[in-house]
């Protein structure tokens, strides 16, 4: 089933290799890459953890926990994939350094291979891991390191992590991953804009009324309150995922399809975001927390290992923001960002709402709308006005021109991590965040966080299973707009 020529050989070392992210996302993605011929025969996957597992133990764990997540239509390919797997026990930050010696012996003799160190672990471990990696003599000129989000909890902490990792690895070797950027729709957004002549002339404030970017989830936070109390929706989703989607929607056309040219344009968008500070935070942002409704528990009632604290009462599980980009293309066009837990649907999408026609000769028309859906089913819809069939007066109806990737293309649509891991192994950083990009995002987010934390106000409650607090609808309603809720 090979669809590409085999990649160059690499050793992929996953710190946190027995954890949830590895088992649910990374290993299934790597198996699909193996099945589709994107891994060279000699490429190895080395899991690192404190588990004390042998190679056989780890392969047995993967066989038991991962195989049900992937279609095993070729048992020989599955066995080949299991044969790539190894495990090394390492206690990062501990007194016992013997694990580094075991990893060194496993990697010995393969110094000319690319080495990719994937840190599927909390950000506090990034610096210590990189330092101990260097002390063990395992960082080579052909090494790369992948950092999972969240990268810090504010600008100073992000800068500290960047400094610690940057002391060991050059910027060109650091890959800060955001799985949203691996989705087909996100990549098709660039193709849609820059490979088609009809959109770019109207992709500006003359023709676009506003843009909505939504990431809604039906799930709550059972068992995760200890993490979520100190993260919240703004840090967990807006600072990375939603701002990444905003930059790709709003960026200027790069001079070429170049790994740095695209990232340069994304940074310019973040730098052009109008700061939201002081009393403007109350006007342009909304935060909410879900409460019990419809048999679903409220945030404070979710199962957790510890009882709710003051931080639990103050953390937001929903946020909506009205952002503005201060440049010629987007002056006066609001970008509405929204994310929340316990919403009535699971959906991630970008909605570009165009202005009405300058002079309508037909009654009942509505403005055109472009919807780029990332999940649950990736695709693109352009809503245009059409005449309903029939004699008599002309009756207009909005009709979607739809492109569903799953229905249009016969090939399997790869998961986001498949694309991103392929790019990591190939050394292509285009879909990964640069240091200046991460820090520019935190500079815009930090004043909002600061205003919320210094305020005595609690998040606005909203019943679980609804579309968020009333303030989110007022945020758009003040200008006569409303959230896109089609097919809810």
Image (cartoon, rainbow, N blue to C red):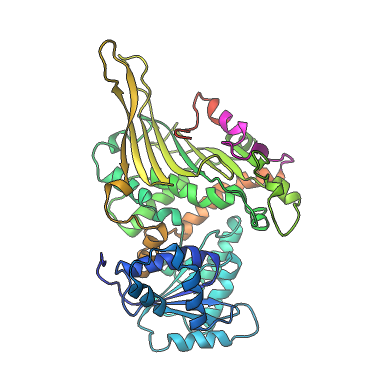
Q: Quadrant of residue 361?
A: top left
Residue nearer the viewer, 338 or 43: 43
Magenta stretch holds residue 242: no
Where in the figure is residue 415, as x and y percent of width and height? 39, 57
Please give the name of the residue rendered at 50% of the width and 28% of the height, measured from the top-left corner: 482
Q: Position of residue 279 (x, y in %)?
A: 64, 35
Region rendered in magenta: 455-474
Query: Is 262 drawn above or below residue 111 in the view shown?
Result: above
- Is 408 situated left or right of 301 in this image? left
Instruction: Name which quarter of the figure residue 394 lies in.
Output: top left
Eyeballing the image, is 338 above or below 386? Answer: below
Total numbered badges shown on the rendered structure: 0
Left or right: 269, with 222 as reference point: left
Closer-to-camera residue (412/122): 412
Residue closest to the eye, 163 or 144: 144
Q: Is residue 93 visible in the rendered structure shown here?
A: yes
Is 295 situated left or right of 188 in this image? right
**Residue 315 against residue 327 in the figure, above or below:** below
Nearer to the camera, 75 or 290:
75
- Residue shown at the point (34%, 59%) measured from the top left: 259
Q: Is residue 461 magenta?
A: yes
Can residue 166 be seen in the rendering of this structure? no
Task: Indicate left or right for 277 with 242 as reference.
Answer: right
Identify the residue at horizontal 57%, vertical 48% (top origin): 219
- Quadrant containing the N terminus in the rendered view: bottom left
- Give the quadrant of residue 316: top right
């Amino acid at each position: 089933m090979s669809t590409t020529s085999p990649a160059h050989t690499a050793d992929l070392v996953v710190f946190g290799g027995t954890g949830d992210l590895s088992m649910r996302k990374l290993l299934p993605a790597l198996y699909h890459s193996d099945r589709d011929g994107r891994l060279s025969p000699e490429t190895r996957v080395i899991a690192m953890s404190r588990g004390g597992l042998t190679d056989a133990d780890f392969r047995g764990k993967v066989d038991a926990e991962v195989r049900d997540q992937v279609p095993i239509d070729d048992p020989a390919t599955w066995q080949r994939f299991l044969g790539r797997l190894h495990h090394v026990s390492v206690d990062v930050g501990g007194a016992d350094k013997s694990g580094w010696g075991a990893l060194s012996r496993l990697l010995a003799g393969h110094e000319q291979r690319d080495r990719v160190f994937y840190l599927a672990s909390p950000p506090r471990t990034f610096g210590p891991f990189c330092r101990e990696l260097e002390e063990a003599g395992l960082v080579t000129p052909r090494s790369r390191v992948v950092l999972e989000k969240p990268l810090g909890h504010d600008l100073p902490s992000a800068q500290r992590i960047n400094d610690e990792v940057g002391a060991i690895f050059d910027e060109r070797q650091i890959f800060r991953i955001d799985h949203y950027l691996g989705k087909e729709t996100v990549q098709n957004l660039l193709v849609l804009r820059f490979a088609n002549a009809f959109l770019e002339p109207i992709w500006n404030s003359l023709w676009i009324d506003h843009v909505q970017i939504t990431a809604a989830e039906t799930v709550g936070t059972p068992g995760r309150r200890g993490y979520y109390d100190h993260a919240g929706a703004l840090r967990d989703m807006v600072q990375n995922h939603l701002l990444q989607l905003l930059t790709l929607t709003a960026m200027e056309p790069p001079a070429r399809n170049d790994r740095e040219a695209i990232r340069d344009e994304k940074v310019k968008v973040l730098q052009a975001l109008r700061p939201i500070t002081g009393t403007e935070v109350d006007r342009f942002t909304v935060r909410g927390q879900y409460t019990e409704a419809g048999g679903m528990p409220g945030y404070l009632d979710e199962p957790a290992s510890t009882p709710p604290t003051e931080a639990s009462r103050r953390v937001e599980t929903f946020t909506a923001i009205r952002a503005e980009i201060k440049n010629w293309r987007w002056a006066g066009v609001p970008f509405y960002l929204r994310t929340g837990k316990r919403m009535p649907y699971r959906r991630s999408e970008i909605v570009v709402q165009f202005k009405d026609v300058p002079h309508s000769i037909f009654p009942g028309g509505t403005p055109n709308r472009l919807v780029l859906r990332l999940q649950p089913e990736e695709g693109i819809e352009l809503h245009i006005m059409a005449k309903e069939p029939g004699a008599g007066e002309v009756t207009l109806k909005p009709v979607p021109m739809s492109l569903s990737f799953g229905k249009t293309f016969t090939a399997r649509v790869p998961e986001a991590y498949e694309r991103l891991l392929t790019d990591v192994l190939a050394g292509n950083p285009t879909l990964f965040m640069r240091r200046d990009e991460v820090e520019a995002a935190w500079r815009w987010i930090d004043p909002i966080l600061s205003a919320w934390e210094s305020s005595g106000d609690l998040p606005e409650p909203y019943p679980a299973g609804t579309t968020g607090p009333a303030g989110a609808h007022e945020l758009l309603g003040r200008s006569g707009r409303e959230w896109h809720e089609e097919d809810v």
